Image (tube, rainbow, N blue to C red):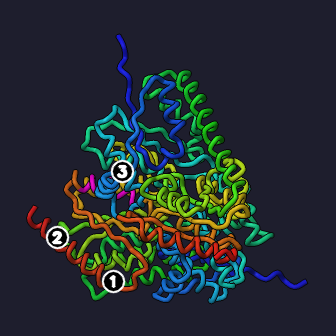
Amino acid sequence: MAEVKKKSVSFPRYAEYSCAFNYIVERALGCRYVMPPALTKRTMELGTKYSPDFVCTPFKTILGSMIEALEAGADTLLMTHGLCRLGYYGELLEQILRDLGYQFDFINLSDYDMSKKKEYLRILRRFDPKVNYARFLVQFMEGLRMVEYVDEVTCEYYKNCGFDATDGQYKRAYQDFLTAMYTAQNRGDVEAGYRAAKRSLQSIPLDKPRRPLRVGIVGEFYTAMDAFSNLEVEQKLADMGVEVHRWMNVTNQFLRYGSGQKNLRVKIQDLSIYDMGPTSTANIWYARECAERGYDGLIHIKSAACTPEIDVMPVLQNISADYKIPVLYLTYDAQTSDVGLMTRLEAFYDMIDMRKKVL
Amino acid sequence: MEREIIKIGLPRALLYYRYRVLWRTFFQELGMETVVSSPTDRAILEQGTALAIDEACLSLKIYLGHVAALIGQCDYILVPRVSNFGRHRAMCTRFESTPDLVRNVFRNSGQKFLSYEVDQEMKKAGEEDAFVELGKSLGCTAKEAKKAYKAAKKAELGHHKERVQRYEQQYKKEGMKVLIAAHSYVAEDPYMGRMVSDYLKKAGVIPVRADMVDREAALKHSRELSPTCKWEVNREILGGIAMHKGDVDGIILLSAFPCGPDAMVNELITRRVKGVPMLNLVLDSQSGTAGVETRLESFIDIIRFQEGKL
C-alpha cells in the first residue's frame, strides 16, 4: 500500500507566531506546514471582497490569508475557537470558501467541546490518525517555548529599537532572530537563536535619554499584536524615539494567566467588577498599571466593530481622566494607506512630548 | 419599624424585552416596586447616542438613553451580566460588559446599580443561583429569593408560551406572511423593529416572529442551519427559521447597526436558506421612516411578483 500522503496544513498568518505554528505542525503533528504568504494589500482586498460588511476586520484578514494559503498548496485549514465572535469565524469562513469553490479539509475547533480533554485527542487524530501523543506533547511544548521567546524578544525590541545608536544593527538583530525562529528545525536551533538574539540586543549601544517618552499599548488581541494589521504602529512610534510597551501577547494572555485572570482583577475592582469581554481585564489592568507608572500616553488599538474593545473604551476614558494620561484611540478597518495614521501619531507624539517638557 | 419599599428601575431596552415578566414578578414577590422607563422616543435615543461610544450598536445607544431616564427615579437600576447558559449558548459579549459599562458611564451620577451574573460555562452560575444571590444582596433570605425566582420563572415561561401560541395562530391565517428574524429588543422597540411590523400590517401583510417559538425545540432545530452557532438568541432565531420557513412568503433579517452576531449569522442564513425571498435590513438611528418603507414596499412587490399576484 502506498504511504498515506501527509496533510498540508495551514493556519492564517498572525503576528510573528507563524514560526511556532510551522514548528508545531511539522514537528509535533508530522504534517507539512504551508506558510501563508505575508499579508499584503492583496490579502485584504480578497478578504474584504468576500466578507460580510460589518464583521470585524480580522475576519477579513483571515479570509484573505486562507485563500492565499489554499493557492499556495494547503489542503487542510485549521481555525480556532474563541470567546467573542472569533468562536463563529470557522463556520462562516468555511461556508464562504466552499461557496467560492475551494476544496479542502477544515478543522474547526468550535466543533469540539474544548473543556473536555478527550476532544483534544479527536482533534489530533484529524491531523494524523496514527499520531504519537507523547511525541506530540514534547514537540508542542517546544513550540510554546518558541512563542515565549518570540514574545520576550519582541517586547525588548520595541522598548529599545527607537534608541539604536548604530546604523540599524538593532533592527537587523531582531530580523535575524525571527529568521532563526522561522527556520528552526529542532530545540537546539530555537535555543541558539534565542541566546544569540539576547546577546546581540544587549550588546548593541543605545542612545537613550534618562527619561524617555514611554507609551503603553492596549487593545484587541489580533489587531494590537499583528504589525501588518495595525500598520506597524509600534515601529512607527519607536522610530519617533519612544519606548513602546505592550503587555498583551500570547505568553501573557494564555500561557501565564489562562482565562482566569483573577489576580489581575484585584487591582481594578473599582473600575470593573466582571470580565467585560475576553481581554478586558488584562487591558484595563495594564492601562491603569501604565498610568500609575507614569507613562506618557496610552494607545488603544482595535479593529472596526470589535464589540468587546468598544465596551472597554468608557473605562479607559475614566482612567485617562483620573490619572491625566492621554489616550489615543485607533480603529482599524481594511485600510491600505498609512498616511492618516502617521498624521495622528505625529500629533500624539508632539502632544505627549510637550506635556513631558512642561510637567 | 416598617421597611421602606425598595424601588428597582428597569431600562426598557435590550434584555428587558426577554425578561420583563421574570424581573417584574421576581421583585414583586419580594415586596419591591419596579419602575420601567417609558418607551423609546427621540429624546431617549439622542441622549443615549451622546453617552455611547460612536461605534457602539444602536441597541446599546438606546439602552444608555433608558438608563439615563431612570437616574434618580429609583433606588437601584437593574443591569445584569448574562454571559452564557452553557456551551454554544452564549450571549453577545455586550451582555457581559453592560454592568461595568453602565457603572463607568454613569459614575458621577450617584445612582446605585444592581447586577446578577449568569455564567454557566466559566463559573457554573446558572440563572437560579444568580437570582438567589441577587435576592440576598437586597436583604432577603436565600429561601425567599429562591421562592420568588421559581414563581417568576413560571410566570415568564407561561407568558412566553402564551405569546408563542398567539403567533402559531398567525400562521394559520390566510394572506401573505413575512417572518421577521430579529432580536426581541430590535423587533419590539418603537424606534427600530416596531416601525417595520407596523408598516407590514398597514400593507396587509401578516408579520410573524422567528424567535416566537418553543425555545428548546428552536435550539435543536438551529443545528440544521448552523452547527456551531454560539449565541443563544441567534440560535432561537435560526431554529425559528428552520421550523417555519415553509409557512411564510418571505423572511426579513432585521438587525441594528452594527450588531456583531447578526453580521455573521445573517450572512450565513442568506448563504444557506434558499427558496424564500429574503430582505436584509439593517437599522441605524434614522430620523424618518421613508427609507425603510421604500425597501419594505419593494420587498412586498417582489414577493407578489414571484407568486404571480402582481
Residues at marks 3 and 1, CA–CA distance in whole angstroms: 34 Å
Q: What residue is pinned by disc 3? A: B64
Which residue occupies the foreground of this view, A160 or A350? Answer: A350
Residue at 67% from the left image edge and 63% from the top image edge: A137
Residue B36 vs A217, above or below: the answer is above
What is the secondary structure assignment of the residue under circle 3?
A: helix
Whole-percent x, y for residue A177 in the image: 45, 80
Query: Could you tell me if the residues under marks 3 and 2 are in contact, i.e. CB atoms within 8 Å?
Result: no
Q: Amino acid at mark 2?
A: Met
Q: Chain of mark 2?
A: A
Is residue B34 found left or right of A130 in the rendered image?
A: left
Q: Residues within 10 Å of mark 2 (few under 14, many from 20)?
A: some
Whole-percent x, y for residue B95 in the image: 48, 50
Whole-percent x, y for residue A182 in the image: 54, 81
Q: Chain of mark 1?
A: A
State the image quarter where residue A67 is shown: bottom right
Any mark on residue A351, and which? 2
Residue at 58% from the left image edge and 74% from the top image edge: B301
User: Which image quarter holds the N terminus of chain B?
Assistant: top left
Q: Chain of mark 3?
A: B
Residue at 47% from the left image edge and 80% from the top image edge: A178
The stretch drawn in magenta includes residue A315: yes
Residue at 42% from the left image edge and 61% from the top image edge: B57
Q: What residue is pinned by disc 1? A: A338
Q: Which residues are magenta?
A: A309-320
Which residue sits furthest right? A1
The answer to whether tags 3 and 1 share a subunit is no
What is the secondary structure assignment of the residue under circle 2?
A: helix
